[in-house]
Amino acid sequence: MLHLVLLVSLLGGPIPPRAAADSVRPDDDVRQVALRHSTEIRQCYESRGLKVNPELSGTLEVELIVLPTGRVDSASVSASELAGPGKQEVESCVVENVRNWRYERGPFAKESIVYPFQLTRDRPGAATALQSS
């Protein structure tokens, strides 16, 4: 089985936006969007990465800009520990999927969110889990 740990941040919430906002989405809402789409991230890792390189693992940080409408305006890899065959394919797949995520529409400012995805292969006998810090 494969293991994907979703770390929304070291302290349990998204990394704060770089610019001050009038109203920022609640941390729980941001986490819930990522959890709703966790199977997409896992699929990218399994089908694009592990099939090419069974040893591929590491943290992949994706930064996205969310508009007040809830639409993702842009997404890009801000940092990656992935190395070797499959790295580019996983990164491209994750970014492509994240661009299609939708957040709640509301009186929110345009904001930057960084999701750190910990991509690791399960060790034999370990349980499969998805965790949000």
Image (cartoon, rainbow, N blue to C red):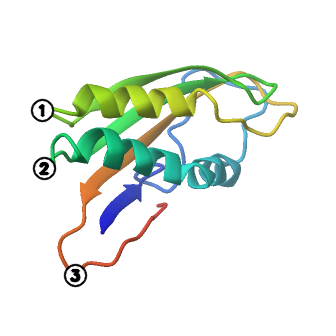
From this view, report whether residue 56 is shown above or below residue 125.
above
Q: Which of the 4 image quadrants contains residue 35?
A: bottom right
What is the secondary structure assignment of the residue under circle 1? Answer: loop
Real-space Cα distance between discs 3 and 1?
26 Å
Q: What residue type is labelled 2?
A: Glu
Q: What residue type is labelled 1?
A: Gly
Quadrant where the N terminus is found in the figure: bottom left
Within-10-Å neighbours for mark 2: few <14, some 14–19, many 20+: some
Between disc 1 and disc 2, whose residue precedes?
A: 2
What is the secondary structure assignment of the residue under circle 3? Answer: loop
Of residues 63 and 126, which is closer to you in this image? Answer: 126
Between disc 3 and disc 2, whose residue precedes?
A: 2
Left or right: 95 in relation to 33 = left
Residue with the mark numbered 2: 55
Residue with the mark numbered 3: 125
Of residues 78 and 120, which is closer to you in this image? Answer: 120
